[in-house]
Amino acid sequence: MNEPTILKVTSQSEEVSRSPREWVRKNLFANIPNTVLTLVFGAVAIYAIRALLGFILSGERRWGAVATNMRLLMAQGYPADQFVRVWFTLGSLMALTGLTLAAWRAAGRLSIGKISIWVMNTGAIFALFAVIAPISWASRIGWLIAAAILLSIGLGLWFGLRGEKKRPSGSVPTVWFAFGLLGVLVLSLWTVPFGHYAFVEGEFIAESGRTVATSTKLPFTVMWLILIGAYLFGVLIRERIPGSRAKGFLIALWFLSPFILNWIVLRDPDFDYAHIASTDIPLALLFAIGGGLALYLLSKPDLGEIGRIVAIGFLLFAVFNWIAAFFGWYPMLQKVRISFVLLALAALISPNFASDRKTRLRFVTGWIVLIAVSHWLVTAINSPSTLELQGPTYLGGFSLTLFVAVLTLLLSFPLGVLLALGRTSSMPIARVLSTVYIESIRGVPLITILFFFSNILPLFLPEGMEIAELAAIVTGYTLFSAAYLAENVRGGLQSVMRGQYEAADAIGLTTSQRTGFIIVPQALRVSIPPLVGQAIGVFKETSLVAIVGAFDLLRIAAYVVPAQTEFLGVKREGLLLISAIYFIVAFSMSKYSQKLEERVGLGER
Amino acid sequence: MMSETPSQSFHHQKPPFYRDAIVVKWLFQLGALALVVFALWFLSSQARDNLAARDISTGFDFLSIDPGINLSEGIDTRPATGGRALWVGMVNTIRLATAGILAATVLGLFVGLARLSNNWIVNKLGSVFVETLRNIPLLVQIILYGAILANLGDLSYDSGWDNWVIWSNKGLSIPRVFIADGFYQWAIFMLVGSVAARWAYKSRQLLHDETGGDTYPWVASLGVLGLFAVIGWFIHPIFGWVGEVFGAIGDGISKIPEEALQAALSISAVLFAGKWIRNFLRSRRTPGGPAQLNDDDKFRLVFSGVVSGLVILIVYVVWPGLSSWMINSSSDLFGVLEDKFGNGRTGGPFGVDRPEVIKPGKFEKYGPSGLTMSIGFAAVFFGVVFYTAAFIAEIVRGGILAVPKGQIEAANSLGMKRSAALRTVILPQALRVMMPPLGNQYLNLTKNTSLAIAVGFSDLVQVGQTVGNQTGKNLSVFAIWMLFYLACSLTISVVVNFFNVRLKIVER
């Protein structure tokens, strides 16, 4: 639709059928100014690539600093004998990924022609590398041979599978192609010898016994197998269970995974089983059965106003519990207070489910699941960790970066939606409060907010209450990110047509039903692309927590590794590596968001 | 899924008060307000108690106390008071942000155009620039650039290119261009030259209208201007007499008696008001005689009279010294001009000071000999410029692609050249789309300069953090940060809005 051709280059893939000579003439040497541009910028490009490669391959670079500290960069002070927990976490995520790919029927197919072009391109890049990189002649020949092999594979695919038309026929599922690529990566771990570098008498020696690769190649292979196994399993069972239920289950698992994997698997809480048996389980049962019964009654269609009065009574009681706990009037378990708040909220929305028996039972089932999960989480989070740590936190490096990013996104999402609703609502006080909040947060840099929360927040807390450094940082980051998220969601809210509001009113929906079932889903659908952009931003800006003292990826690469006696001042290598890590994650997310934008079909309605 | 049950009647019955939409709305809002107020009250009372317990006083008295800190660079590296230190930080931030905005706009424009190029290499280079730089966190980039610059090698006689451009771990230095002796007389040449250039442009344009051929009016006018600049460079002392003229004017002004100026000011105020009133009344005249004046119009008439009266009052009563001050200052001004344009100024209009290394590791003087960007400044500058330029490039590209294809085809069918179409058809329309997101990027850039703390450049946040740690007034410093950045945001959005309004489609 928006393909103005005059200023835009036609994409390369459309030009496959044209001869290379014509392509070069059209795109590189169309006229004299174009030829000059090609020559000048070609020279610039070659110079830049050569300089970059020269920097990376120079003998002065000490990549050993990065290779040796890989564990530090990924999972800072995590005890080495407990590493199986890290692998379990990664394995769970892999299994979830595989199942998700199967459930969503990632059915894209890649044509053999495209793959052969990719292979040939890679070969061409290798050849280019061999020609312009400042390397020795021996390795240059090695690279050229690799390039020749790749080129011949590509050409073989191209001509060997040529179909009836000129193009090669046949295709491969994208998923399997990606699995294959990952497999090649894992395979390279088995062959490429990483060294464990040690600093002995001013000289670096590579120990052959304890290499980085030997410690990780087996687990990574297992991860790869788990991914494939989960995918195959998902494909097998996806015909037997209804798709919507499986998808809902997987979404719930994804949502819960950071809580379970972080607080339970990685943190290894020390459960007090006697207390669990005597208090926790009875409490959970009480709330599940009692609350479920109450909600079943409250969602009776002909209950009328009594239901709402009871719900408001619940709410007042739940709020009063917190006030009482705050002033110390009577003691009550934190878990019970949380459960009462949840019960009050569920009671408030219960008229929305006032329908036939089936709907009401589903509502009650949801409540029981909610109670089970929340009680389990509260118990696990409140149990002390048994890890013996050297550092301040059990997470560090890349794992901390991911943790902060995921937790911030999860927590700021509901807050951002609420703020956006507040800002667009017709209630003046709510609107002013949300607007002031959003604009003042957006007016200041993130770093000042982080300083506020890590330096100044302790001043605001009551006597005897403390907040962990990391919790303070995540709180500040969440409040910051929510303001930006609210603006993205607001854009979506404003794009919902007036008619939708009117239609919802016309069929007699209440305000909460209209907002929850009609308006917000449509608004979120429109704001998915900017929200993914926001997620990329949150991921990138987690690097700022390094300034306020958290040991994230950046802090370890920029301050911890250069301070080691073996690698004093070796900073640029680590920074280049983490740039690559950040780039890979952010770039693939942005590519995904572009795909999503096409699929959501923006601009088609 | 939410079927209405028959038992729910649709009679008109008033809902109970707790379900009345108005009541619920206001109860909810008042509750939210009460919660916020309570939270703020509670937190501030806690803060007061905690501060008292730690023996820290709040307030802004630290602004006038010596913080005892040294700053890495700025207009004052050893500030005497906390306020002065923060002021230095603000100046550094503004310096960085202004330079960054200019550079990022230019670079972003070029990269954005490159991404639209038909040339494969240029296009791909643009894409690689954008995709790489915007997907690496800015802070990582800043620290990486800082590390690379800090490893540049020590300053020696042969770092850089022959004292023109010098790069070392002291920073990046370029020659400093300054206004020299002959500048003002050369400026007269340029003034005459621009008149001539305008004439050349007009005449070439006229020729084009008559003959229809290519007459290159821009080339001609720029050529004329260049010619004047070159000739003026050598023979500008012939304008030495201009200084004498200014001197004579200054002498003349100083001879004017005070009373005469007072009278002239009063008379001109009265005349001006009278003329305005006459014009105003004339504009209200209708064919059927003077129109009825409404209250607003009467107020305007009275107001203009009052203003002229105020002028007279100020001249004679409130500030009688005003006229002598005006006379003195303008004769002083002409005195200065006489000196600037005077005879005996034979040097060139511009001078160049190259960075001079007097011994390894030391420039002759940091300020006057060349312009030197410190490592910290350069790291943050390149960081924010590259990062923001990548985003600006996307905005430029999107803005140009948003121009409807028909506009370009129309320009082509009129026989416009590509450059002319770009200048007069595409860019003006694209700018309209680009302006709001561009303003956002400028805001982001300004806020992102706060990452300077990572490389130790003394911007407001870094100075504030140091001052706060020294004095314990972190809370007050936070308030100043907030005010400063909000003021910056407001300034930028006012400027962007101004252009936005100017660029709007004028609807008739």
Image (spheres, coloured by chain):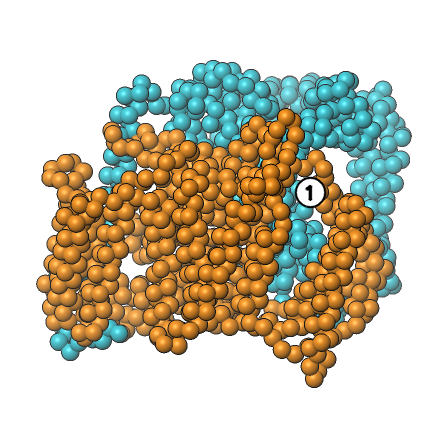
| Res. B134 in view | yes
* Residue that sits furthest to the bottom in the current view: A164
Viewer-proximal residue among A149 and B432: A149
Viewer-proximal residue among B177 and B215: B177
Left or right placement of residue B310 versus residue A501 in this view? right
Q: What residue does disc 1 label?
A: A56
| Res. A480 in view | no
Rendering coords of residue A173 (x, y %): 55, 72
> How many circles with numbers are drawn on the protein?
1
Q: Residue at x 42, y 61 (%)?
A: A96
Placement of the N terminus of chain B among the 4 image quadrants:
bottom left
Amino acid carrying label 1: it is Ile
Q: Residue at x 28, y 70 (%)?
A: A505
Rendering coords of residue A481 (x, y %): 42, 47
Q: Colour of chain B?
A: cyan
Rendering coords of residue B13 (x, y %): 13, 69
Q: Colour of chain A?
A: orange
Q: Residue at x 49, y 15 (%)?
A: B68
Q: Residue at x 36, y 69 (%)?
A: A246
